[in-house]
Image: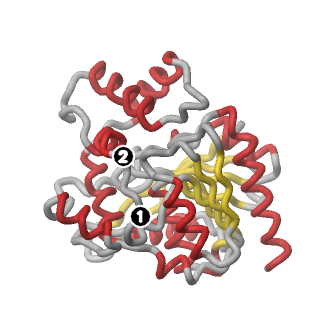
Amino acid sequence: MEIRTGTARISVTGDDDDLEIYYEDLGDPSDPPVLLIMGLGAQLLLWRKGFCERLVNLGYRVIRYDNRDVGLSGKLHGRRAGGSLLPALARSFFGRRSESVYTLEHMADDAAGLLDHLKIDRAHIVGASMGGMIAQVFAARFPKRASALGIIFSSNNSALLPPPAPRALLALIKGPPPDSPRDVLVENSIRVSRIIGSPGYPVPEEKLRAEAIEGYERSHYPQGIARHFGAILGSGSLVRYDRQITAPTVVIHGREDKLMRPAGGRAIASVIPNARLVLIDGMAHDLPEALWDDIIGELQTTFAQMSDTH
């Protein structure tokens, strides 16, 4: 399947330079577009090619991209992520914002800029984890551009939600030193996948290793993780955005997710008008291939609502 690739130049508020957002564009350009937004420190690779191809085979144009500060997109080198982490986490628990280099709002603007570059007026917006937070902000700020909304294992960071399991959170935000040997970094990536992955759908060791190596060789930039985490802490509760969302919405969450607990998905679905909540047994904080058809089926059901309501 042909993959069209490119970079979109995005103006960055308060910065002299534009930011380049790297994207891959699959399927017939005349088909309804689906924009896939990945999570914290995660490259577009985590929207696996096979997952994208299934959407293309169902008649969609699929765009996946690297967020700022990850993968092949532009990096904000040398920018400090913000203040002390523990006070910021405490403020986040109460839905309050902290100082950050950029916010989820800026990252939603990146998504809008990418659609501008591709001359796409409206798209189905699908986000996973932090990408689901960006998707919520996008759908609220650009209501005419979101045909339908899919939010996978995410949260609206509303006050008093159960926090992530410490082991899962630390695995994600605290890795080995960035200049560690490749083997050490690959082993850490496998360990993280095991901690946050779906217990009902374990991935074979050799597949985890191959994917970890692919990610490392494409781009190794752990410095962006702290700024991504800062963007979440810098935006605070997203309830104010959820109340504004008018697009048909499905919220998909794994019952076994210890990083973004199911309470996060329930919180989103309870605020977005007419949102549909789908909880999946055995699923945690990844997209197991065995569940692709189920997940895509739920997304397709919601995409179809767009034609009924717009």
Q: Where does the C terminus fall, quadrant-wise?
A: bottom right
Q: Which quadrant would the N terminus be assigned to in this image?
A: top right
Q: Residue at x 80, y 43 (%)?
A: 57
Report which residue position mark 2 lands on: 165
Which residue in the rendered view is the most extreme toward the top? 206
Q: Amino acid at mark 2?
A: Ala
* Residue 289, percent from left and from top: 65, 33
Q: Residues within 10 Å of mark 2 (few under 14, many from 20)?
A: some
| Residue of label 1 | 161
| SS of the residue under disc 1 | loop
> As drawn, is 140 to the left or to the right of 250?
left
Q: Position of residue 95 (x, y in %)?
A: 35, 73
Disc 1 residue crowd, few under 14, some 14–19, many 20+, Cα 10 Å:
some
Q: Quadrant of residue 170?
A: top left
State whether residue 150 is above or below residue 73.
below
Identify which amino acid the numbered label 1 is placed on: Leu
Q: Residue visible at 61% across and 75% down?
A: 272
Q: Nearer the viewer, residue 210 or 62?
A: 210
Q: For this rendering, which residue is in front, 182 or 159? A: 159
Can you give x and y, in whole percent of width and height, for residue 94 in the image? 32, 72
